[in-house]
Image (cartoon, rainbow, N blue to C red):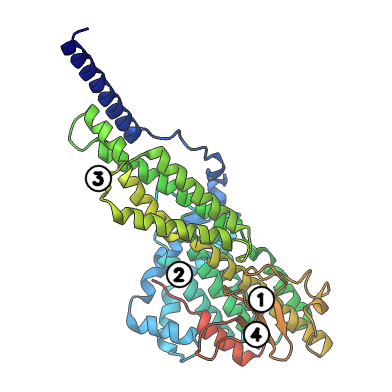
Amino acid sequence: MTRNRKIVLGSVAALLLLLGGAATVIWLALRDDLPPDDADLVLAREDIPEAENGFPLLDEAQRLAAPSLHSKTAYDAVYDAIAGRAWNAPAIESVLAANTKAFALRDEGLARGGFRWPDPGSRHTATAGYLVLGKCSSLRSLELFRRGREKEAIEEALKTIDLGCRLENGQGHFVDYLAGLAVKGFGLHRLQQLVADAKLDSAELREYGQRLLPCGASSQGAANAARAEYQIRCSSIDDVLAQLTHRKSGPPSIGASLMSGYELKVNRTKGVLAGVCRAQVASAGQAYAESAPERARLAKEAEMSEADVRSIPSWLRPNGIGRFILAEALSVGDPGAKAKCEANVHVSAIRLQISILAFKKAKGKWPDRLDDLVPEFIEAVPSDDFDGKPIRWSKEKRVVYSVGPDLADDGGDETDAKGGPRDIVYHLDPKDAKKDIAERGVGSTE
């Protein structure tokens, strides 16, 4: 073999190796994972006959209620009244009169057997109107109580709680779930004040406490909200891919398809999102302390993902758009964990308050321990959804309390020396119960 021939053959071999290496790099850059196995994350939509679904009526009710607080006078009057600061009778009367039809539709919607939001992937109904409806219902309850119609006022508060439970468990967006928790909270805090002030005997108090039983310890609503968000994000990824592939009018070219596969690896991105969703679904059934390691892992991944996105421009690396989508999803963390725990604590604490008041009416004294209430006044002492232990009671301070998200038992102290939050406290004294309403029961309609 001549020297020139060897050089030619060597050059050809080197070129083939170079081309093979380039092809491997391109293949790795364009290769996507297999579609994720996400059957466990499919939101199994409850089949509710149209005649039994309260959504259309309740949605019309919130649409009618939404404008009633647009004026500053009405807005301030409602918030001042609910917080116990002032009672602007003309403005309040005007707000309640404007919501007469909304209340009627709400009652008709609640009378139906079920409630289900429309498919999360096909709509996004504004929830602000439901918050306004919840506020106005709380106001109506207070107005009835001021007129001496105590039991009607309590029933109105229970309707507000029922509305919140329907929204919370209606298999909608995560924002729908949060709106449900907020509306339920409006009703719970109103009920807290009313049962403390009302002239009710022990049996009546026990009945009201029992009616709250279906409203607590909800994990399915949070789990379904996580699944709905996963479904929405996956649909958004498909939409982004379609836009990348059809950048120009006409059928997509091979080059456009290859480029879009480089910029967005659909299956890989969905696979990571599936892992995030599974963590959120798992935390829905856990106490806050139990889910802490997984939430810490998600927070670390979010930090690394954000740094990754910032370090190199997206167009210089495979799946640049997918990395951006994942960074945004991970940055949210697990927002449902704390909200779910707070909501469950609210229900448990207020049920215990009612049971303690029933005990006091029947026995003429405060219970030494919460176990003294079982089984005559409550079937079991509910757990604190933050640390998983039984919720606490301080006879000396006359408070029911949760350790809260810091998981430290501060003996029922609400704040530290600097005014920072400690335990989540619910007072048995009517005057202090009204303070709970002012601090927690107002919320926002934004």
Q: Which amino acid type corresponds to the residue marked 4 in the rendered image? A: Gly
Q: Nearer the viewer, mark 3 or mark 1?
A: 3
Q: Which of the 4 image quadrants contains residue 303?
A: bottom left
Q: Secondary structure at mark 3?
A: helix
**Disc with the residue nearer the chain's start (1 vs 4):** 1
Q: Secondary structure at mark 4?
A: loop
Relative to 307, is 122 above or below?
A: above
- Mark 2, residue position: 131
Query: How far is disc 3 from disc 4 in space, using C-alphas?
Result: 54 Å
The percent coordinates of residue 400 (x first, y second) are 68, 81
Comparing 177 with 92, the one in front is 177
User: Residue visible at 46% across and 35% down?
Assistant: 35
Q: Nearer the viewer, mark 4 or mark 2?
A: 4
Q: Which of the 4 image quadrants contains residue 256?
A: top left
Quarter of the N terminus within the rendering = top left
- Mark 1, residue position: 349
- Mark 3, residue position: 315
Q: Which amino acid type corresponds to the residue marked 1 in the rendered image? A: Ala
